[in-house]
Image: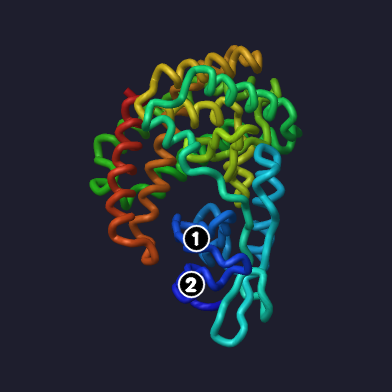
Amino acid sequence: MPELSALLQALSNPKAYLHTPSRVELVQTRISAVFFAGDYVYKVKKPIALDFLDFTTLDKRRFYCHQEVTLNRRLCPDVYLGVVPVTQDGDSFSVEGSGVEVEYAVKMRYLPHELMMDKLLDSNKVTPHMVEKVARKLAEFHRKAELSEQLASIGALDTVTRNNEENFAETVSYVNYTITQGQYERIKDYSHSFLKENARLFAKRVTEGRIRDCHGDLHAEHICFTDSLCIYDCIEFNERFRYTDVASEIAFLAMDLDFHGHPDLSKHFVDAYVKASGDEELPKLSNFYKCYRAYVRGKVEGFELVDPNISEEEKIRALVIARRYFELAESYAE
């Protein structure tokens, strides 16, 4: 494949697209580059390997592009249009053009930025009725989500413990940078104690079928209040992060509502989900999973600080957000 920096520069040019948008905006994460090009959005996976994913070959990136489309159509069917090639002809690159296929992108319809839940939360435009709507949609989604004995084992105590230990291992180098030593130790001690004291509850969740093929990355930025309510950008690259207890999924969004300063909506959302799903034991796990999810968000934001393709301005923003998430995780641990 071409050098990533050259590809990012080429696809930031409106001439790289058949519909020739007036402008192209590039937004990067640690694992993806997203190009906002008028009515369409194109997402390219970076050729990297981390402990939890492997995008190092073109075949793998193409496979996970198709996985992303298939899985996200469960909750957002009209937005994910398919997988398209990025081609090279001489020194020029284009999307869906002629030439040699050198990369692949997920093609999506543009979702209105102003209707994203995180933006609406920041302007106090999210109502209890709106979070109830999300809760009901998720309860129905979880009822229909894949369930099997093999998949249930992925969400059992051993895997939850492994995920926790992985979090702490992957953030050791960030201590006294995005997270303080005290926060790190307190959250780690709380997590270990909770898992040890609630082993029977975790086992019961497995036998009751509460481990499902979920969204896996359910925070406010991934919910758009279109007419059909679009919940998008699920985890496609690692089953271990997606097959999980529904309590963990619900806690993720509840935590993010707390993060945006709306604990009232957070509680209302959890209560609405319990009512819609009949999952009366879910609240017993909410605080633990909120802590876990806040820690994950802090960790992921921290990853951006070591990405050479991300600007210094974006890194400063990521540092501030990472520290806020770790502070929130500590508040649950206390």
- Kind of residue sitting beneath label 1: Ala
Residue 197 coordinates in the image, percent (x, y): 48, 20
Task: Tell me which numbered mark, 2 or 1, is placed earlier along the sequence.
Answer: 2
- Which quadrant is home to the C terminus? top left
Residue 141 figure quarter: top right
The reply to whether discs 2 and 1 touch (Cβ–Cβ < 8 Å) is yes
Image position, residue 235 (x, y; %): 59, 45
Looking at the rendering, which quadrant does residue 87 occupy? Answer: bottom right
Q: Nearer the viewer, residue 294 or 21?
A: 21
User: Seen in the image, is 32 located left or right of residue 232?
Assistant: left
- In the image, what residue occupies the spot 55% across and 61% down? 45
**Classed neighbour count for the residue bearing mark 2: other residues with Cα under 10 Å, few (<14), some (14–19), many (≥20):** few
Whether residue 313 can be seen here: yes
- The residue where tag 2 is placed is 4
Q: Amino acid at mark 2?
A: Leu
Q: From the viewer's perspective, is residue 87 above or below residue 81? A: below
Question: What label sits on residue 33 in the rendered view?
Answer: 1
SS for callout 2: helix
Q: Which mark is residue 326?
A: none
